[in-house]
Amino acid sequence: MTQYNIAVVGVTGAVGTRMLEQLEESTLPIETVRALASKRSAGKIVEFKGQELVVEELTEDSFEGIDIALFSAGGSVSEKYAPYAVKAGAVVVDNTSFFRQNPNVPLVVPEVNAHALEKHNGIIACPNCSTIQMMVALEPIRQAYGLERVIVSTYQAVSGAGQSAINETNRELQEALDGKALTELSAEILPSAGDKKHYPIAYNALAQIDVFTDNDYTYEEMKMTNETKKIMEDDSIAVSATCVRIPVLYGHSESVYVETKKVADIAEVKRLISEFPGAVLEDDVAHQIYPQAINSVGRRETFVGRIRRDLDAANGIHLWVVSDNLLKGAAWNSVQIAETLHERSLVRPTHELKFELK
């Protein structure tokens, strides 16, 4: 039986640590795991199945003998090192945004478009966390009734911005509880580490995730638009998003409004979602049952509830969608892609390198 040598790049980060945990529980036949990170983290110890792994510094030569490389160390790291992994014969599953819109790279949510893996060129992109959970919720609706329009407002956890954002949130909350005025709290990370101004997240909601683009939408919002079209292979679906950061540590929530091509039966929509792989229906308002972020933490599924018809548009449906942004939104989706590659016998070297070595 084939056994794989797997590398995890960014192994000490919020997503990387969960990639290791998901690999521990994975059905993948694993021979070895190589823990890779920046020079700063080299020498640290991480655990895999009770064994200590010494974190190695990521270099261009780190991928000799590696079959599958999972990347979650930022777009610039993937840009530079993923092509070297492919050159060495590995298949890369990249959790950053860098390759998502590259025409040579499939963008995959396994429950939705696993078929896209068949033509991979050595790199597979994992979509944005907020896109992934929305795809799991909407694909059964799209298959049955078609989708014309999607309007989504997100309520995103701070862990999506990394461990430093979690630390900043906890510090601010504690300072506020200790009596510091909310307007006097200092911020260095949120809403976006790459932007000029920073605002406190404690007891606040920030209508900005990532930096703004020329059209006044943020990059996070445009990711949801462009990734939906690519994953569902339909540029005609109208998608617009408003992405908001809230002071929750783990678990993204979304209010999603869709307009279908054919008028849907709501009871049937609930049934379709309840039967869709990776989706869990939590929808019993008579007993106040609906998805909650705290209940999603540590779970691989996407939870869907509050499903109801729009009051005015016959083809309009509202949904509430919740998932652990670090698991289905990142680490689990990446490992799930690797499992699917294995199941379809697609873990293979790529002979024609389509990505630039830098």
Image (cartoon, grey):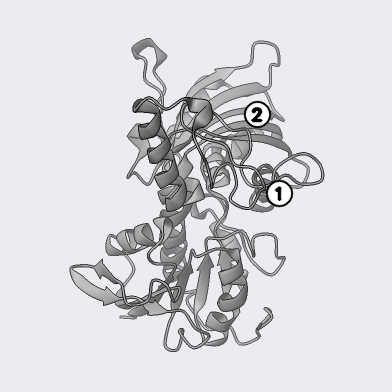
Disc 2 is placed on an element classified as strand
Quarter of the view holding residue 131 = top right
Q: How many marks?
A: 2
Mark 1: secondary structure: helix
Where residue 124 appears, as percent x and y from the top left, is: 57, 66
Q: Earlier in the sequence, mark 1 or mark 2?
A: 1
Compared to 343, does 55 lie above or below?
A: below
Q: Position of residue 125 (x, y in %)?
A: 58, 62
| Amino acid on which the number 2 mark rests in the picture | Val
What is the crowding at mark 2: few (fewer than 14 residues within 10 Å), some, or many (at least 20)?
Answer: many
Residue at the farthest left position: 50
- Asked if 134 appears above or below 329 in the picture, the reply is above
Other-residue count near label 1 (Cα within 10 Å), few / some / many at <14 / 14–19 / ≥20:
some
Residue toward you, 144 or 229 = 229
263 to 59, vertically: above or below: above
The residue positioned 68% from the left and 53% from the top of the image is: 230
Q: Assign the C terminus to one quadrant of the image.
A: bottom right
- Which residue sits at x=60%, y=17%? 309
Pinpoint residue 257: horizontal percent, then vertical percent. 63, 26
Q: Nearer the viewer, residue 268 or 57?
A: 57
Nearest the eye: 189 or 75: 189
Task: Give the mark toward the camera: 1 or 2.
Answer: 1
Given residues 211 and 227, the one toward you in this image is 211
Quadrant holding the N terminus = bottom left
Residue tagged by mark 1? 226
Q: Which residue position is annotated with label 2?
A: 258
Which residue type does callout 1 highlight? Answer: Asn
Left/right placement of residue 27 relative to residue 293 reads: left
